[in-house]
Amino acid sequence: MLEYVKTILQKVSFNRYLFERELKKGLRYLMPTEIDEFRDWCYDRFGLTYQPILNRYFKPTY
């Protein structure tokens, strides 16, 4: 499921509204063990563009 959610986010990354909606849905589908990997991938891939949205859905790691 992780790869599917990544694919969807890449496809909708052109639109802020769609990106946030699909990120929210994707987090519901993932297993708790996949969330850390997904968070890191999201920040690597979309951190420059959508950091405020990502910060809303992921707790900061220190």
Image (cartoon, rainbow, N blue to C red):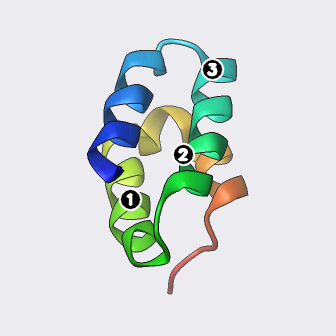
- The one nearer the camera, 42 or 49, is 42
Residue extending farthest to the bottom is 62
User: Which residue carries the number 1 mark?
Assistant: 38
Please tell me whether residue 62 is drawn above or below residue 17 in the rendered image. Answer: below
The residue at 48%/12% (across/down) is 14
Label 2 environment density (alpha carbons within 10 Å; few <14, some 14–19, many ≥20): some
Q: Secondary structure at mark 1?
A: helix
Nearer the camera: disc 1 or disc 2: 2
Label 3 environment density (alpha carbons within 10 Å; few <14, some 14–19, many ≥20): some
Residue 17 on image: x %, y %: 69, 20
- Labels 3 and 1: the sequence-earlier one: 3
The residue at 41%/27% (across/down) is 8
- Labels 2 and 3: the sequence-earlier one: 3
Please tell me whether residue 22 is drawn above or below residue 59 in the rendered image. Answer: above
Q: Secondary structure at mark 3?
A: helix
User: Which residue carries the number 2 mark?
Assistant: 26
Q: Secondary structure at mark 2?
A: helix
The residue at 62%/55% (across/down) is 28
* Disc 1/disc 2 C-alpha distance (Å): 10 Å
Q: Which image quadrant is residue 45 in?
A: top left
Nearer the camera: disc 2 or disc 3: 2
Callout 2 amino acid: Gly
Please tell me whether residue 2 is drawn above or below residue 21 in the rendered image. Answer: below
Residue 29 on image: x %, y %: 53, 53
Q: Is residue 60 left or right of residue 3?
A: right
User: Which residue carries the number 3 mark?
Assistant: 18
Callout 1 amino acid: Phe
Residue 62 on image: x %, y %: 50, 87
Do callouts 1 and 2 mark residues in contact (Cβ within 8 Å)? Answer: yes
Residue extending farthest to the left is 3
